[in-house]
Image: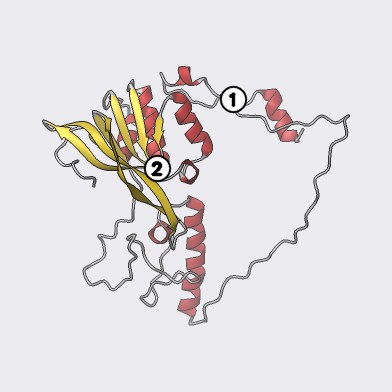
Amino acid sequence: GLAGEDGLQNVIDGITFLRNTNLGKREKPGDKVVVIGDDSVAIDSARVCLRLGCEEVHIVYARSKELMPVSPPEIEGAESEGVKIQYLTAATKILGKAGKVVGIECVRTELGEPDPRERRQPSLIKDSQFVIDADAIICARGQEPDLSFLEPGHGFEISEWNLFVVDPDTLQTNILGVFAGGDAVTGSATVIEAIAAGRRAANSIDNWLRGEKFFKPYKVCKPRMRVEAIELPEEFEGITRPKMPSLPAEKRIHNFKEVEIGFTEEVAICEANGV
């Protein structure tokens, strides 16, 4: 946890907050809310806060906008609605008084060289501390695997990020016959990456049970060729991909209606026909 959060009211878990909202428990967490996190949970929590009537909502994120693991439309949607995203900023301490949140202490960061996972780790900039006033904090930081089921002395090699260390080709751990994949190996990633890891691990497990040598699955590479772009003759009209229409920000922040309106029948038919 973050320094200062113990014993304070209105320090809320992001997933719990979103779950309660979906279940109809729509209570405004505070007037000034700071969300700590970098993923879709953080973005969704901030946007929900606005819809619940919060006056000011910040997201504190230690890396740059380009490195935020959220799709650009989500970021643009949040910022257009009024969410203030503090990039290159790390939360260091939650400030409280009489058992209640009164603010959060932050410090500016700068990005270093890529680590073994190809992520640029942020470092704190000296003498750059500042405080954001707040009466509620939502913690939506990245989650990590729960390895509490492992008994003491389990023998597995675990990385400094609390992840299983595996052979990159076979996904076998350092213990013979035990394989791991998905978020427990890579950290937070996509569902399809976890499914792909399961497929690779299944292939390795099958080979191991048969007593056969491990091998990389053969991949059929489709031939490719570069086709130079051509200029359209003047009689042809260039058509760009239509942008998904959405409710104006000033209207959608007051309700939980679907943000994207959808294409008209005419546009949908044109898209389907490739026109």
Name the secondary structure under disc 1: loop
Q: Nearer the viewer, mark 2 or mark 1?
A: 2
Q: Position of residue 273 (x, y in %)?
A: 75, 34
* Numbered disc total: 2
Name the secondary structure under disc 2: loop
Which residue corresponds to the image point at 45% horizontal and 30% vertical from the top-left?
Answer: 78
Q: Amino acid at mark 1?
A: Pro
- Tell me the quarter of the image containing the C terminus: top right
Q: Position of residue 188 (x, y in %)?
A: 41, 52
Q: Quadrant of residue 42?
A: top left
Disc number for residue 88: 2
Is the residue 109 above or below the residue 83 in the image?
A: below
Q: Quadrant of residue 103?
A: top left
Q: Earlier in the sequence, mark 2 or mark 1?
A: 2
Q: CA distance from mark 2 to mark 1?
A: 31 Å
Disc number for residue 75: none
Q: Crowdedness of circle 2 by 10 Å Cα count: few (<14), some, many (20+)?
A: many
Which residue corresponds to the image point at 50% horizontal and 26% vertical from the top-left?
Answer: 259
Which residue corresponds to the image point at 33% horizontal and 56% vertical from the top-left?
Answer: 145
Q: Using the image as rendered, state which of residue 156 and residue 112 is in the foreground.
A: 112
Residue under label 1:
245
Is the residue 205 above or below the residue 120 in the image?
A: below
Which residue corresponds to the image point at 43% horizontal and 72% vertical from the top-left?
Answer: 172
Discs 2, 1 touching: Cβ within 8 Å: no
Q: Amino acid at mark 2?
A: Leu
